[in-house]
Image (cartoon, rainbow, N blue to C red):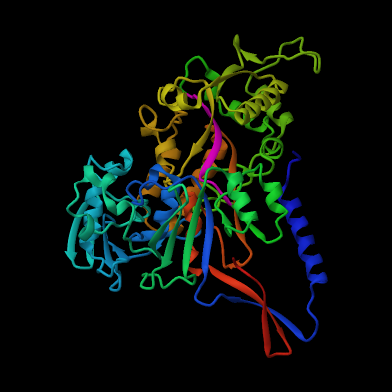
Amino acid sequence: MRSLRWWQIGLALLGVVVVAALLLRPRPEETITTVPVEGGGTYTEALIGAPRLLNPLFAALNPVDRDLSRLIFSGLTRLDGRGRPTPDLANWFLSSDQRTYTFILKPTAAWHDGQPLTAADVAYTIDLMRDPASPVAEDMRALWSTVSVAVTGTQTVALTLPEPFAPFLDYTSFGVLPRHILGDTPPAGLAQAPFNLQPVGSGPFQFQRWRVGSDNVVSGIDLAAFPNYIGGQPAMGGVSFRFYPDGEAAFAAYQSGEVQGLSRISDSLLPEAIQEDDLNLYTAYLPQTTMVFFNLRDEALPFFREKRVRQALLLGFNRDRVVADVLGGQASVANSPILPGTWAHASDLAPAPYDPARAAKLLDDAGWLLPADAVAGTRTYIRSKDGVPLSFTLIVPDAARHMQIAQMAQADWAVIGVQVQVISVPAATLRSQYLDTRGYQALLIDFSLAGTPDPDPYPFWHQTQVESGQNYSGLDDRITSQYLEEARITSDLGARARIYRSFQIRFADLVPALLLYNPTMTYGVRNTIANVSLGALSDESQRFSTITRWQVTTTRVVTGGDATSPTSSAP
């Protein structure tokens, strides 16, 4: 299939819009307007997969549950389009020692069953998150186990940390659970609670009913707008979801008019989706960076400890060609370990270009030389220094895409005199057998940051995380660590962003890992749904962050100023 570039797509769509405008231009006595559907209307979206437990404690285990929980439940805070924490259920203030966050619940906060939402519900949910029997991630449980919780009033709860930790606010976006319904259920029994199939939350939409097909299998779910939502009643009257086994079935449902939205359009379906005139496509970066880790602590590989060698490997790999030829343009070349689109990303830092001539010079200057008899274009020559060849193994997950990328790197690096042996291993073993044990020389991986909304790079690049943490490359740089330490205790986002910019400049100079690309996702929504927008995503369910403003619309033609007739409407 021919690769597609976004600028080509944009030009094609612009052409469609211009032609349509010329052909469908109304007569002088007609006015075409788009207005909201009376009663708010319902938006219907296709989800791939099936729900299991509609409870935010379990949501991390299943993407469909995360999507639904995002709409049914709300947190003390939520994240805006750039990943910044903003008030949801509560406002807050921070103590002068930057350790105690006092949250004051908004006085109208209420559950879908009409009961008031109180500070006791917040404390109850936190107790669940740190209970060993709860299914939360181990790092999340560890965090909340260090937090002191004090309910100081019906609407006030104080959360005290052992030391300042600027990313903390992001973790307060957890879905709050109702104590008056679940309080008598032991944590070990939460997975079997009837609540998980008929949830009561405080989010913008409330559970209405399950849809069951003729085969008695759940085929969908209907949610109704919650009129007393703390953020204001949603513009739409409801949201419905239909469940499909794969993207092809979901796309067929869109084409037949069963749904108005597609939660994700795969690369293989994108060319066909572009041909749908009434389908608006939205793109956003996934919370993931594909990169190559270098093992800087491997004594057998002295060249990885040399900055100029790492810089040469970056300059000597054509990452633009990877994005164009392997990914069909559905990604961008990475320029930072902090995800693009977030408040902390330094967007003015351009990615290093493909420059094999400069790469070769860096290696020459570092003393990694070609053999004296090397003749360009006759065979592959391997650089060496002090009898050590510039040669290493590259561990790659056993997927066709990753193998193709690795082979492209192998070929590009051979041009500058670097020998690479590609070794394919089962993806399931990548972390346990290679990353955690540091049992690799170089390793290609899709590094996911899903579920970690704050950009805090401390766990991956700080000195203290080299031995047993997640600093897999083994970067031991005091200046980098100082930036990361300072950012963790700086509560002002503007000041933190400036610190992180310094960190990103330092990272680009040191190249402790080779950043390849940031993949994108494509979300499709019929053009009868207005006000849709996507921002930075720490999880794909965050595409609903602005859903309270979405509107189901209908297009009307007004003739002579007094007659109206609908020309199209949402199904």
**Which percent across, then down, holds residue 408?**
68, 27
Res. 303 visible in picture: yes
Q: How many labels does the image show?
A: 0
In the image, 162 versus 107, the foreground residue is: 107
Magenta region, main secondary structure: strand
Q: In which quarter of the image is residue 200?
A: bottom left
Asked if residue 256 lies in the magenta stretch, the reply is no
Horizontal side, residue 517 vs residue 32: left or right: left
In the image, 387 versus 321, the foreground residue is: 321
Q: Give the quadrant of the N terminus.
A: top right
Q: Is residue 259 above or below residue 36?
A: above
Q: Is residue 212 above or below residue 355?
A: below
**Which percent across, then down, holds residue 49?**
48, 45
Horizontal side, residue 186 vs residue 94: left or right: left
Residue range highlighted in magenta: 284-296
Q: Give the quadrant of the C terminus.
A: bottom right
**Which percent across, then down, holds residue 452?**
42, 46
In the image, 80 versus 223, the foreground residue is: 223
Asked if residue 292 lies in the magenta stretch, the reply is yes
**Which percent across, then down, holds residue 140?**
32, 44
- Residue in the picture at 78% in, 86% down: 29
Res. 282 visible in picture: no
- Residue in the picture at 53% in, 77% down: 38
In the image, 246 versus 488, the foreground residue is: 246
- Residue in the picture at 64% in, 19% down: 367
